[in-house]
Amino acid sequence: QVQLQESGPGLVKPSQTLSLTCAVSGGSVSSGGYSWNWIRQPPGKGLEWIGYIYYSGHTYYNPSLKRRVTISTDTSKNYFSLKLTSVTAADTAVYFCARGYGSGRFDYWGQGTLVTVSS
Amino acid sequence: DIQMTQSPSSLSASVGDRVTITCQASQDIRNYLNWYQQKPGIAPKLLIYDASNLETGVSSRFSGSGSGTDFTFTISSLQPEDIATYYCQQYNTLSFTFGPGTKVDIK
């Protein structure tokens, strides 16, 4: 059973960088055929896909965020990470990590972590 | 960018009712359409993938249909545990977009 667990600071100051990691167990971030995704949800709102890193290391980001986003993996520790620069209050959200499979479906999700951007 | 719309934005139905939600894409996405259920404070759960395939372990009272730009999600007999928000999600040309969600309540 694949499990994902997000971790990182719950509070980030405006203009700083949001950094989160997602630990993967029961599977490998190097496994062929999967993408490793970040998705966020502002309080009371809908879901927004941020980007993914493929098992091969290829990345693709939401065009609306791509100038500020970096997703990377650490295969030795079996986790992947999100960095979002120059954050504002609009980046306050629950951040989920999720595994992507097949035709872009997200079949396993972390529980989510709330990140608040505030001074 | 492909935009997704869902209707209705919310609905109230009685236990045992048949519930239908529609999702429309701004351009042809073939059958690259998935449906999720999200309960408050919990991560979304995949219910239907590729428009009409039931995810393993998901109740058969959930079903999906459609292709191209118009899709439908159905709960055949609404149960109290189905109270949640339901999202459609498309995959096309390497990018993903979610619909705005439909909140389902018990009348």
Image (cartoon, coloured by chain):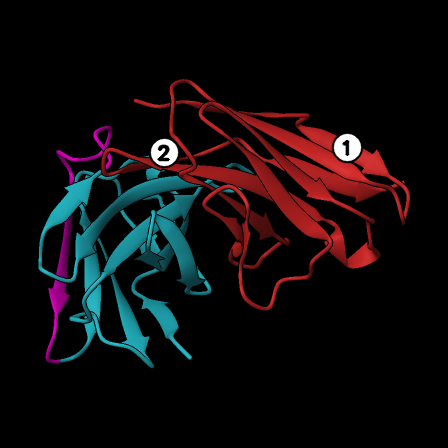
Which tint was used for chain B? red
Residue located at (52% from left, 36% from top): A45
Residue flagged by tag 2: what amino acid is it?
Ala
Residue located at (39% from left, 31% from top): B30
As drawn, is A97 to the left or to the right of B46? Answer: left
Of circles 1 and 2, the one toward us is: 1
* Main secondary structure of the magenta stretch: loop
Local packing at callout 1 (Cα closer than 10 Å; few below 14, some 14-19, many 20+) is some
- Name the residue nearer the viewer: A12 or B102: B102
Quarter of the figure with residue A42: top left
Chain drawn cyan, letter?
A
- Name the residue nearer the viewer: A26 or B66: B66
- Which SS class for mark 2? helix
What is the chain letter for disc 1? B
Residue A3 drawn in magenta: no
x and y, in percent, of residue A49 in the image: 34, 42
In the image, is residue B90 above or below residue A28?
above
Quarter of the figure with residue A56: bottom left
- Which SS class for mark 1? strand
**Circle number at residue B11:** 1
Residue located at (33% from left, 57% from top): A101
Residue flagged by tag 1: what amino acid is it?
Leu
Which contiguous range is marked in magenta? A62-76
Residue A69 drawn in magenta: yes
**Circle number at residue B98:** none
Asked if residue A116 can be seen in this view, the reply is: no
What is the chain letter for disc 2? A
